[in-house]
Amino acid sequence: MSAIGYVGGRMKIGQAVFQDYQGIRRYGIVESIKVKDRWTYAAVKWLDDKSYEEAMSYLEEMRHKDLAVYEYRADQLKQIDPKKERKTLKKIIDYQKNMRKND
């Protein structure tokens, strides 16, 4: 069964993903997948996610209910290749270092 709702390929367990939540960039690993109403949903293990957790704790305190999301529709997540990301980020860091040297 092909799942609707995911652009750019099928979601896989173990896939690295990111999500922007109101300016908070979150990185994680897909832990499980299910298809519901022809949409693919994923449970994600988020890493270094303190900002999101603090935001959700604040909302829970203010509204007296848990508003955290535990399953994400696949179109809410972006697949990433961590090796490629690291390589590109290294180029950015090196470029910035060279810019500072020229100041």
Image (cartoon, rainbow, N blue to C red):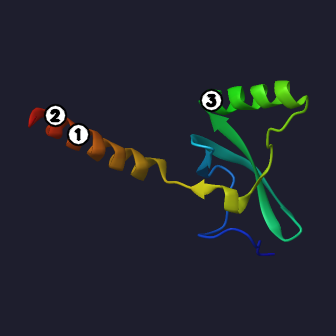
Q: Residue 51 carries which label?
A: 3
Q: Is mark 2 on a helix, strand or loop?
A: helix
Q: Is mark 3 on a helix, strand or loop?
A: helix
Residue at screen point 83% across, 27% down: 62
Q: Are marks 2 and 1 in contact (CB under 8 Å)?
A: yes
Disc 3 residue crowd, few under 14, some 14–19, many 20+, Cα 10 Å: few
Q: Which of marks 3 and 1 is nearer the N terminus?
A: 3
User: Which residue reaches farthest left?
Assistant: 102
Extreme residue toward the front, this view: 62
| Apparent side of residue 12 relative to residue 40 in the rendered image (left or right) | left
**Tag 3 or tag 2, which sits nearer the N-term?**
3
Q: Gap between marks 2 and 3, in whole Å? A: 30 Å
Residue 29, by quadrant, is top right
**Residue sitting at x 49%, y 53%:** 81
For disc 2, the neighbor class at 10 Å (few under 14, some 14 to 19, many from 20) is few
Which residue in the structure is indicated by mark 2? 100
Which one is nearer the viewer's eye here, 68 or 45? 68
Numbered badge on residue 36: none
Q: What residue type is labelled 1?
A: Gln
Q: What element carries label 1?
A: helix
Residue at (62, 42) in percent of width and height:
28
Circle 1 residue: 96
Quarter of the image that includes the N terminus: bottom right
Amino acid, disc 2: Arg
Left or right for 11, reference 24 = right
- Pinpoint residue 103: horizontal percent, then vertical percent: 10, 34
Q: Quadrant of residue 74?
A: bottom right
Question: Three-letter amino acid code at disc 3?
Answer: Ser
State left or right for residue 63 relative to residue 21: right
Relative to the observer, which residue lies in front, 8 or 66? 66
Neighbour tally class for label 1: few under 14, some 14-19, many 20 plus, Cα within 10 Å: few
Q: How far apart are marks 2 and 1 (CA)?
A: 6 Å
